[in-house]
Structures are given as C-alpha cells and as structure tokens.
Amino acid sequence: MTVPLKKIVEALEEMAPPQLAAPWDNTGLQVGSPDAPVASILVSLDVTEEVVSEAARKKANLIVAHHPLFFHPLQRIETDTATGRLLGHLLTAGISVYAAHTNLDVAAGGVNDLLGETLGVASWSPLQEGPPQEPRGFGGIGELPQRMRFRQFLDALKAALKTDAVRLIGAPPRGVRRIAFCCGSGAALIPQVIRCRPDLFITGDIKYHEALCLRMETIPTLDIGHFPSEQGIRKSLTQRIRRALRSRLGKTLPVYASRSERDPFTTV
C-alpha cells in the first residue's frame, strides 16, 4: 500500500503549519515529488548518512526530519562533498525528504512543548511571542509543581533526557522551581530570560560570551546540548503521524522513529 506524498504533507502541515516557521528557516519538501508514492516513513532529527542507510534498510522512501537538509540555495551539487553524497544517495534510492523545523518547535505538541513536559513544567508562557495564530511562541517560562533541590532536579533531568553530561553556567541555584527553557539553540532568548529572572534556564548551544553574560546576570543555566533537548520528538512525531494518517485516510503506513542517530558530541 502507498500514499501520495502530498497527502502526507497535508497531515504534517496541519500539525506544524509552515507559516509558523521563522523567516530564515527552510521547511517543507526538500527532496522528491509531491506525487511520489510513499510506502513507509522514517522520522529523524537530521538527515545523515546513517539515517539514509537506515531508511533504505527499512524500505522507507520518505524521511521526515526536524532539521532541514540545507538552509541556503545550492549553487552546485558535488558528490565528493557531504551534502552532495547525501543528495546522490537519496535520489538513487528514491527517498524523499520533508523538514519541519521552527514551525514544529512552536506548534502545539511540538518540540518545545515536549521539552517542557519532559522537564516537568506543568504550564508555561512563551519567552518570545510567536505569530498571531500560534499562542505558544518560542521557549517557555513556567514552574514545577513544587520546589526541588538542584541536585535532585539535575539527576531527574539527566535521566529524562538520557544524557550523562550537561554544562552548568554560573553557581548552582539553591532550589529550582521557576524554569525558563528553549529546545535546540536558545541563546537568542537570553534578553527575555534576563527579564524573567528564573531560578534556572535550560537550553543548548550556549557560546562563551553568551555564557559570560548569563553568569554576570546571575542566571544559573544548564546547557543540555542541542540533540538531547530535541531527540524525544522522533517518537512523539512518529505516533502523531500514524494517528493523523489513520484519521485522514482511514489507513496508515509503517512509520519508524530513527534508531541510528547519535549525539555528535560524546563525553571522553
């Protein structure tokens, strides 16, 4: 059984409307034809050699990725470069690629919602307002059900995110209840975090000078890494795609969450 790719795109864009994406982003269908027949789907964070090989093994001819394969227009395709090799493999294997990035970050049930739930924040407001039609916006600020000791919270966080190492900026807080967070790279929201004065800010990809700023502002921050902050969306999105296809089409396809992806950073 197959489903035209455009029917799957309709379901995906109902979950994460493309108009919610940041202006600089590159979302949507990146490789393939809207009329291509899709037999099965692989959901991943990134499009890598490992993911493409996994899709081929599972006979998945559509990869739904969170991060776009490319952000900028290609001037040439050279198959001795990483991107060129990937495109060659995708085209040869007949595998299409669809990306839902910042639109999936801010959409209801998306990446940022999932991170807030994983952290145990019961309800939150956005750190930065999103488009008028999406009340969640980017990032979040909210409270845990009760105050926790920092070490207790840290141990629970590592277990929930399946990570062994996080980086602390500044002195550890005496206790944690009011939390600011942003999936992926949240440094652009530092001004909003400073205004909110949380007990703890949690995000990934904090650079040196941004860390200095947070330390001087006495805002304890955990850099949990980009991959750990977003990896949970693979399983969640897989389940949502299955439900959406069943609801819209009365049938579903095999939909797999990638098992080959690994955080590019390792602790040594």
Image: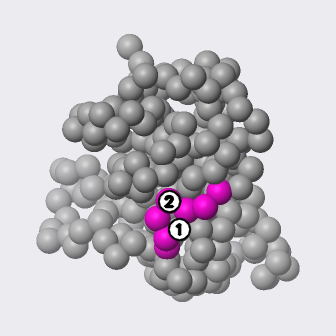
Residue 258 picture location, percent across and down = 59, 47
Write the residue at 54% across / 21% down: 164
Q: Which of the pair 28/6 is nearer the observer?
A: 28
Range of residues picked out in magenta: 124-130
Quick one: SS at disc 2? loop
Tell me which amino acid carries mark 1: Gly
Residue 252 picture location, percent across and down = 78, 70
Residue at mark 1 to residue at mark 2: CA–CA distance: 7 Å
Can residue 58 be seen in this snapshot? no
The chosen color scheme is: one colour
Residue 50 relative to residue 40: left or right:
left
Q: Which residue is mark 2?
A: 127
- Residue 132 vertical position relative to residue 144 in the rendered view, above or below: below
Write the residue at 62% across / 83% down: 10
In primary-sequence order, the first of circles 1 and 2 is 2
Residue 17 relative to residue 30: left or right:
right
